[in-house]
Amino acid sequence: MTTTNFADLGVPSALVSILEKQGITTPTPIQAATLPDSLAGRDILGRGRTGSGKTLAFVLPMLARLAESGQRRQSKRPRALILAPTRELATQIDEALAPFAEVLGMRSRTVFGGVGQNPQVTAIGKGVDIVVACPGRLEDLMSQGHVNLDSIEITILDEADHMADLGFLPVVKRILDKTPRGSQRMLFSATLDGAINQIVKRYLEQPVTHEADSAQSPVAKMTHHVLHIRANDHLPVLTDLVAAPGRKVVFTRTKHRAKKMARQLNSAGVPAVELHGNLSQGARTRTMDAFHSGTAQTLVATDIAARGIHVDDVSLVIHADPPVEHKAYLHRSGRTARAGAEGTVVT
């Protein structure tokens, strides 16, 4: 049996050559499963954990179809919309699509809060093909008349379950109501409970459902450990664990705990950075840059960071505070053992 490649699945050669430059030649299961349907313009319901390669599973067909339809970009009227729950994920998606959009001569723009709106308004006013947005700021710009969705050809909802957790679904519905009926829509989510199902029923037409390693299946190469320790041994044990080589993510229950723990680790001589909802966008970006570059190999984070943050080679995830519910455990733990690598999880 021959392995399918991207060209066989129908991805245009201009995009295949960018994939090859990035060393990506074999589609992941979710890409191989969804691409023939998404390239054909069908609505897609994709179930899969982060780390399954779903960003390219929607970016490639979106760009291929925009290129094929050949509509011109217009002021204030983007042609494609990607909705994401957090600024980090929106930025990450935009960075992933940039080299592919560039080769096709397309422009994209991120739209999210926490930063000034003027650069966003100016870019969209000049005309962009793709907007990658967090729902709150997008609705804000729409209500001010800076963005109009009536020329949208494709809408993508990434991490829909996380949008539900963050209370974004009412806004998401209002946004989707403004996109043309019959335009292509793709929704990706690790879980499909009641709220997500409502969105699927209301906005997707005869969606093709594809599952790639569903949220319930544990990763094969992930080793789980539970350590029973006394309160006053907590910090020494933690310091010991994060002193190991490689990238580590430590999860805490509250922003205050994340801040305190990062400070304690730094005092103990372990370079650590913090990521939580109280940080400004600039601070969040600096944190992720330090973690990506390896100047700090330990990231102390709240659950907001458990979703959709993609950092390669995280070898160890530590639940310093056990998560409140099982879904959070899966999402936090899913920061390691991605894309076939091995990983360890300690609670």
Image (spheres, grey):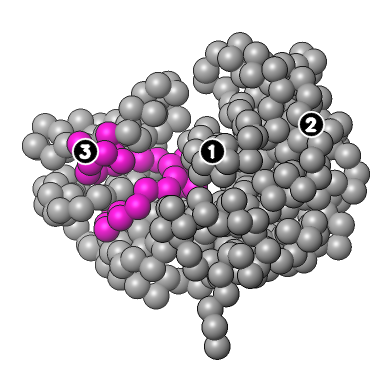
Q: Nearer the viewer, mark 1 or mark 3?
A: 1
Q: Magenta segment range? A: 290-318
Circle 1 residues within 10 Å: few <14, some 14–19, many ≥20: some
Lower sequence index among marks 2 and 1 = 2
Residue under circle 3? 296
Q: Residue at x 39, y 29 (%)?
A: 284
CA gap, disc 2 and disc 3: 44 Å
Of the 4 image quadrants, the one containing the N terminus is bottom right
Which mark sits nearer the N-terminus, 1 or 3?
Answer: 1
Q: Position of residue 177 (x, y in %)?
A: 86, 37
Q: Characterize the local packing of mark 2: few (<14), some (14-19) or many (20 or more) Cα atoms within 10 angstroms.
A: some
What secondary structure is marked by label 3? loop
Cα distance between the residues tagged 1 and 3: 27 Å
Identify the residue position indicated by label 2 in the image.
Answer: 72
Counting every numbered tag in the picture gives 3
Q: Nearer the viewer, mark 2 or mark 1?
A: 2
Along the horizontal axis of the image, is 219 left or right of 246? right
Q: Secondary structure at mark 2?
A: loop
Q: Residue at the spot x=49%, y=38% of the render?
A: 95
State which mark lies toward you, 2 or 3. 2
262 sits to left or right of 136: left
Query: As shown in the figure, which amino acid type bears the numbered disc 2?
Result: Arg
> Is 97 in front, or is 331?
97
